[in-house]
């Protein structure tokens, strides 16, 4: 893998969103914020040096033992590098955050009428530069509204225990609605950018034997410096779960999912969220309001309708990666200088220490590694899609060498597709992160008995790369450019050389309603787990830009010469060609399922 310093090339911010990558500033010497980090680092490196990975002979399949050794040593060293950068304030920490399914999490969405919005905003004390924003929460919502959302859940990962958050939706100046937490309450206490130390404020949230979710939150007072519960109600609810046959499943809007990308606090500090399909395509039901009771004694009760717009229950876990206090490390002008200065040192010390301990756990094989990377928007990424004809499917299946436990699957590529079909996809994009450069990947789609997944058939990179099938691969010749040719903007791509090479060129059409296509959520969600041909899988999280429209290119205008091994199973002309004009930041747990194989 190439130099971490060299890889810090910032892609253009999109809608005001900062990139995971940072500008290269020359060689970096970490200034560790915790004295203990140096000791942890020394011990971890010593442990890794004592058990070097034994690489297999060229052309042989690496054993599970070898893969485990490589995973610990290679990704552990990267984790150590990251923890040092985080401790110095040169990189963002990204951590696990799982909303558990027992008891189920609930969203009680209360409508703020237009005529009360101004007064509600005043009581909410929005920071300078922020204003209330209307959103549609569900696809079934007829119009955008102002909302106050009460979210009650049990969490694991970055923090643990029961939490309640009262949130509204704001415009931070980017024109994209975002969550803003007005108040957070944690049963076991928490660390947030407001407190920053929030004491425990116990409350109850459980499912009784009759299948009723009961939430009871009492007001607190501070006595002699301690937080004390009172008998006075703050917010309480009962939500009776419907029988399985009576459940009304609903779908969140892409707008509401996008609002989660950045979650603000009332001092302008934000947390950055990376999603997967548990967020954009969840097991989510709307409960009949006749089966709900509420008692709301918060200061916001006078500004909301007493009857909720909807009450939502998540029946499964919601898995995120969270970058806490994101704009403390990457200032965006939304946090006042005093707050910024007070939180910068704390963030470096706290998260530098946490991630250094995690790095040691990665090196010893007791924690999953985490890689941050970006699919760049320049040059634009391209997906070529070919349908696999029924008469070629058996031969394709044999050539794909799908391992036991996986089965080739159909997929709907874009919204509006009447039926799912078998597809072969070639994706070419530019990476930054642990490595940087061009990558080309042939893939198809499988099911693992749990969900639809992406299956990597062949992966090439223009840099020295690491994967669980080939381990270390030398750079491969890949060219991918977008530039002017005879008055057009032409996308030109070549992979490899000689008779097995692939090449393509086409004129990039203007973006707009006539060329926009919306990728189906099931296709987007197939990247949650990305299997390799030996059954190893990477787990991926991403920002919501993956849900944004792609630019569709008329396949008849695309010139393709395909000498790849996969050309024997598909037509000479791709059936669909998509261009991603904007980049996407991702967070990956590489080789995630290795222990279970």
Image: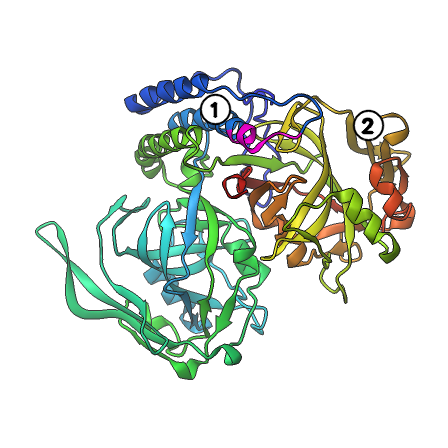
Residue 359 in magenta? no
Binning the other alpha carbons within 10 Å of mark 2 as few (below 14), some (14 to 19) or many (20 upward) gives some
User: For this view, does 401 lie left or right of residue 590?
Assistant: right
- 66 within the magenta span: yes
Closer to the chain start, of discs 1 and 2, is 1
Q: Determine if residue 547 is in view.
A: no
Residue in the picture at 78% in, 32% down: 480
Reply above or below: 113 against 318: below
Residue 25: x and y, percent? Answer: 53, 19
**Residue at the disc numbered 2:** 496
Relative image position of residue 279 (x, y in whole percent): 52, 57
Q: In the rendered image, which quarter is residue 107 located in?
A: bottom left
In the displayed structure, does residue 40 sit left or right of residue 220?
right
- Residue for badge 1: 77
Q: Position of residue 550 (x, y in %)?
A: 72, 50
Q: Which residue reaches farthest bottom?
A: 290
What main secondary structure does the magenta stretch of the protein show? helix
Relative to 135, is 352 above or below?
Answer: above
Quarter of the image where the C terminus is located: top right
Q: Residue at x 40, y 20 (%)?
A: 47
Front-most of 532 and 481? 532
From the viewer's perspective, tell me whether residue 85 is left or right of residue 283: left
Quarter occupied by residue 502? top right
**Span colored in magenta:** 61-68
Cα gap from disc 1 to disc 2, whole angstroms? 31 Å
For label 1, the SS is helix
């Amino acid at each position: 893998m190439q130099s971490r310093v060299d890889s810090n090339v910032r892609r253009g911010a999109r809608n005001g969103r900062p990139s995971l990558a940072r500008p290269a500033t020359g060689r970096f010497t970490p200034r560790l914020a915790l004295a203990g980090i140096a000791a942890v680092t020394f011990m971890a490196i010593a442990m890794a040096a004592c058990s070097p990975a034994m690489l297999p002979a060229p052309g042989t399949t690496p054993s599970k033992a070898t893969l485990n050794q490589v995973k610990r040593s290679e990704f552990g060293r990267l984790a150590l590098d990251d923890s040092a950068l985080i401790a110095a304030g040169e990189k963002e920490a990204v951590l696990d955050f799982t909303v558990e399914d027992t008891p189920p999490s609930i969203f009680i969405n209360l409508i703020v009428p237009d005529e009360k919005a101004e007064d509600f905003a005043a009581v909410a004390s929005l920071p300078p530069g922020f204003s209330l924003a209307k959103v549609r929460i569900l696809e079934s919502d007829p119009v955008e509204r102002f909302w106050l959302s009460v979210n009650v859940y049990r969490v694991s990962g970055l923090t643990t225990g029961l939490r309640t958050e009262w949130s509204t939706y704001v415009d931070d100046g980017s024109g994209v609605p975002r969550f803003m937490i007005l108040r957070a309450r944690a049963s076991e206490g928490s660390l947030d950018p407001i407190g920053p130390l929030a004491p425990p404020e116990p409350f109850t949230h459980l499912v009784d034997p009759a299948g009723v979710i009961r939430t009871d939150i009492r007001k607190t007072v501070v006595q002699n410096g301690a937080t004390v519960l009172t008998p006075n109600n703050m917010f309480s609810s009962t939500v009776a779960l419907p029988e399985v046959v009576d459940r009304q499943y609903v779908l969140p809007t892409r707008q509401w999912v996008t609002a989660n990308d950045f979650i603000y606090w009332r001092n302008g500090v934000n947390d950055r969220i990376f999603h997967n399909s548990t967020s954009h395509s969840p097991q989510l039901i709307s409960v009949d309001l006749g089966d709900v009771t509420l008692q709301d004694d918060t200061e916001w009760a006078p500004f909301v309708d007493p009857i909720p717009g909807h009450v939502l229950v998540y029946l499964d876990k919601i898995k995120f990666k969270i970058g806490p206090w994101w704009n403390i490390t990457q200032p965006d002008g939304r946090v006042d200088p005093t707050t910024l200065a007070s939180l910068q040192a704390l963030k470096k010390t706290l998260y530098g220490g946490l991630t250094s301990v995690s790095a040691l756990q990665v090196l010893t094989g007791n924690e999953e590694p985490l890689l941050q990377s970006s699919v760049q928007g320049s040059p634009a990424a391209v997906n070529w899609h070919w349908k696999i004809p029924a008469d070629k499917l058996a031969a394709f299946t044999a050539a794909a060498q799908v391992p036991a436990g996986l089965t080739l699957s159909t997929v709907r590529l874009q919204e509006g597709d009447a039926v799912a079909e078998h597809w072969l996809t070639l994706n070419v994009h530019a990476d930054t992160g642990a490595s940087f450069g061009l990558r080309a990947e042939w893939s198809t789609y499988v099911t693992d008995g749990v969900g639809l997944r992406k299956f990597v058939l062949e992966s090439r990179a223009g840099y020295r790369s690491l994967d669980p099938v080939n381990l270390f691969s030398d750079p491969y010749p890949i060219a991918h450019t977008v530039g002017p040719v005879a008055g057009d903007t032409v996308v030109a791509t070549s992979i490899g050389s000689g008779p097995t090479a692939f090449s393509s060129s086409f004129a990039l059409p203007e973006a707009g309603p006539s060329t926009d296509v919306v990728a189906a959520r099931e296709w987007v969600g197939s990247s949650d787990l990305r299997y390799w041909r030996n059954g190893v899988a990477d787990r991926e999280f991403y920002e919501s830009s993956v849900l944004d429209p792609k630019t569709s290119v008329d396949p008849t205008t695309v010139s393709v010469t395909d000498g790849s091994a996969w050309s024997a199973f598909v037509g000479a002309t791709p059936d669909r060609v998509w261009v991603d004009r904007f980049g996407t930041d991702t967070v990956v747990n590489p080789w995630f399922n290795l222990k279970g194989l």
